[in-house]
Amino acid sequence: MNNITIREIEKEEYKYLEDFLYEAIYIPVGVEKPSKDIIKNKDLQVYIEDFGNKNDDNCLVAEYNNKIVGACWTRIMNDYGHIDNSTPSFAISLYEDYRGKGIGTNLMLKMLELLKKKGYKQASLAVQKENYAVKMYKRVGFEIINENEEEYIMVCNLVK
């Protein structure tokens, strides 16, 4: 996967965030995928509703052969990984065929770089404990600061 370009999302591409929000839903092995309507749930809409209209909205996309194959976006929102009102929360996903190839790691690192340049002190996320992405989040600098039965709340310090 050498021909991957990581760049900021264009306004007319915001519509793709619906697809990537759906792709970001962790589905344990053996569990059937939910209907795409699940993203209409208000707990999930917080990730994409009116995206681009808030100062803290940031999004990078991974492009392969002129096709967007992944997205990593952040915003300060009251989501599962919410820490405080100055810490952006992460969302990231790739289409299934592009997972496990280092694209997600690259997206995360570029987004952390962007957030650091913009002066944020930390970033957060929530992830299901069983999700294979936990290892990647740790590799890029996230640490577990809290947990409940199902998920970890992780934070990455950007002022190292």
Image (cartoon, helix red, strand yellow):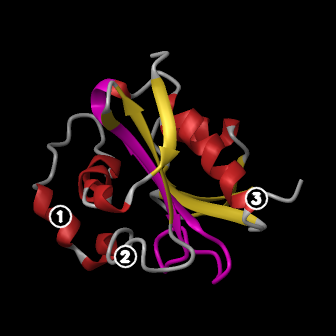
Foreground: disc 3 or disc 2: 3
Q: Residues within 10 Å of mark 2 (few under 14, many from 20)?
A: some
Q: CA distance from mark 1 to mark 2?
A: 13 Å
Residue at the spot of label 1: 38
Residue 92 shown in magenta: yes
Residue 65 shown in magenta: no
Q: CA distance from mark 1 to mark 3?
A: 34 Å
Classify mark 1: helix, strand or loop. helix
Q: Amino acid at mark 1?
A: Ile
Q: Residue at x 62, y 63 (%)?
A: 124
Marks 1 and 3, the one that precedes in the sequence: 1
- Image quarter of the N terminus: top left
Give me the disc on residue 117.
Answer: 3
**Horizontal and vertical percent position of residue 145:** 70, 62
Q: Judge whether 146 appears above or below 43 on screen.
A: above
Magenta range: 69-97
Do callouts 1 and 3 mark residues in contact (Cβ within 8 Å)? no
Foreground: disc 1 or disc 2: 2
Give me the disc on residue 99.
Answer: none
Marks 3 and 2, the one that precedes in the sequence: 2
Q: Amino acid at mark 3?
A: Lys
On screen, residue 126 versus residue 48, left or right, reads right
Q: Residues within 10 Å of mark 3 (few under 14, many from 20)?
A: few
Residue at the spot of label 2: 46
| 62 vs 141, nearest the viewer | 62
Q: Residue at x 39, y 69 (%)?
A: 47
Q: Amino acid at mark 2?
A: Val
On screen, residue 12 versus residue 150, left or right, reads left
**Horizontal and vertical percent position of residue 46:** 37, 76
